[in-house]
């Protein structure tokens, strides 16, 4: 697989993730946020199990056993996914699908710093500029374009806080190549760990009946099979060929699809100032990648 093919797969994943914000928002009207996380990842775990078993058996037949440290790394990645997804779903209780999509995209600002911490690659000045632009755009968007104060919507603040965990997830998937070489197993591990933790938490804090789940079975199925099962697997496969900053750039486009889906299906709207904030997030994301392209031209 070449870089272009990997980026196209990430684009497909971004479309799925962006439209899933609508399903997540609808589900919050019927059950608690953690209960929905538990349901979607339980579906994803069952969906991915056959592929994970096939992949594991294939490696066993070739004598390629999974080292213990790779297993522990997979559990660490799984914990990141569970934490970020739960925070995102809780944030969606009090914010819109459009805002959630754009705010989630702001995690791209953290990826260069985490890559520096993990891989010892120092961020370039254009990257720092892109981070500042993206975070300022998130501030405008989270304040709904009304005033620049710290009184953000609670859901906006929670989702913005989850960006650091999403960024860590992207960084670790790209850095820990051993476990990422088994995409079906890693994807299944992520979903299984998230399902187990969310089921336990929802059983204690958000007891849910079958009657409450029945109206949102389409949303649970879409988020479970496509968003959790297919899209996260595509991410793992693609990041073997695409560096973390570029992968984060492509995946941040989920915000565009979230805004489109929110406008068409939920009637979400953005003020002019909030739209400008959303634009700044995308500008910051683009600068992360085009900065290195501009510098050689300036030298010449």
Image (cartoon, rainbow, N blue to C red):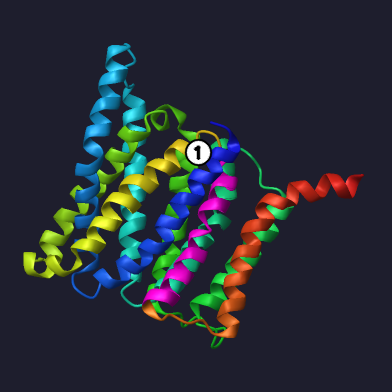
The relative height of residue 278 versus residue 42 in the rendered view (above or below) is below
| Residue 117 showing in the rendered view | no
Is residue 201 or residue 106 the one in the foreground? 106
Q: Which residue is mark 1?
A: 239
| Residue 15 showing in the rendered view | yes
Q: Residue furthest bottom?
A: 146
Q: Position of residue 171 (x, y in %)?
A: 49, 43
Quadrant where the C terminus is found in the figure: top right
Q: Residue furthest right?
A: 300
Q: Position of residue 58 (x, y in %)?
A: 29, 19
Is residue 83 rendered magenta in the image?
A: no
Q: Position of residue 248 (x, y in %)?
A: 54, 50
Is residue 53 or residue 70 the one in the foreground? 53
Q: Residue at x 23, y 59 (%)?
A: 220
Q: Is residue 281 left or right of residue 48?
A: right
Q: Secondary structure at mark 1?
A: loop
Q: Within 10 Å of the Cα at label 1, are there few (<14), some (14-19), or many (20+) other Cα atoms?
A: many
The relative height of residue 10 versus residue 275 in the rendered view (above or below) is above
The relative height of residue 31 versus residue 10 in the rendered view (above or below) is below
Q: Residue 29 lies in what quarter of the image?
A: bottom left
Q: Is residue 212 left or right of residue 143?
A: left
Q: Residue at x 26, y 26 (%)?
A: 54
Q: Is residue 207 left or right of residue 60?
A: left
Q: Residue at x 24, y 51 (%)?
A: 41
Is residue 3 or residue 244 the one in the foreground? 3
Q: Residue at x 42, y 53 (%)?
A: 165
Is residue 252 rendered magenta in the image?
A: yes
Q: Which residues are magenta?
A: 242-265
Q: Magenta residues: mostly which secondary structure?
A: helix
Q: Position of residue 292 (x, y in %)?
A: 75, 46
């Amino acid at each position: 697989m070449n870089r272009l093919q990997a980026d196209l797969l990430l684009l497909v994943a971004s479309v799925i993730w962006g439209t899933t914000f609508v399903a997540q928002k609808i589900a919050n009207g019927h059950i608690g946020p953690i209960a929905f996380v538990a349901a979607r990842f339980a579906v994803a775990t069952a969906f991915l199990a056959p592929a994970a078993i096939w992949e594991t058996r294939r490696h066993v037949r070739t004598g390629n056993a999974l080292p213990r440290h790779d297993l522990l790394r997979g559990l660490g990645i799984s914990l990141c996914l569970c934490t970020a997804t739960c925070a995102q779903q809780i944030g969606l209780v009090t914010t819109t699908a459009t805002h959630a999509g754009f705010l989630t995209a702001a995690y791209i600002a953290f990826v260069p710093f985490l890559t520096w911490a993990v891989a010892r690659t120092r961020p370039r000045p254009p990257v720092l500029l892109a981070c500042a632009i993206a975070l300022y755009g998130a501030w405008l968007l989270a304040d709904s374009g009304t005033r620049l104060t710290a009184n953000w919507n609670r859901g906006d603040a929670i989702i913005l806080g989850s960006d650091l965990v999403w960024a860590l997830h992207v960084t670790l998937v790209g850095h820990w190549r051993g476990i990422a070489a088994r995409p079906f197993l890693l994807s299944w591990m992520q979903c299984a760990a998230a399902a187990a933790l969310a089921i336990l938490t929802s059983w204690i804090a958000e007891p849910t009946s079958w009657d409450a789940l029945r109206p949102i079975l389409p949303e649970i199925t879409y988020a479970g099979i496509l968003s959790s099962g297919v899209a996260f697997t595509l991410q793992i496969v693609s990041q073997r060929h695409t560096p973390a900053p570029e992968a984060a750039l492509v995946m941040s486009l989920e915000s565009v699809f979230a805004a489109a889906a929110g406008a068409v299906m939920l009637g979400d709207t953005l003020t002019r100032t909030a739209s400008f904030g959303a634009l700044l997030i995308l500008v910051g994301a683009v600068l992360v990648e085009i900065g290195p392209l501009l510098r050689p031209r300036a030298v010449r």
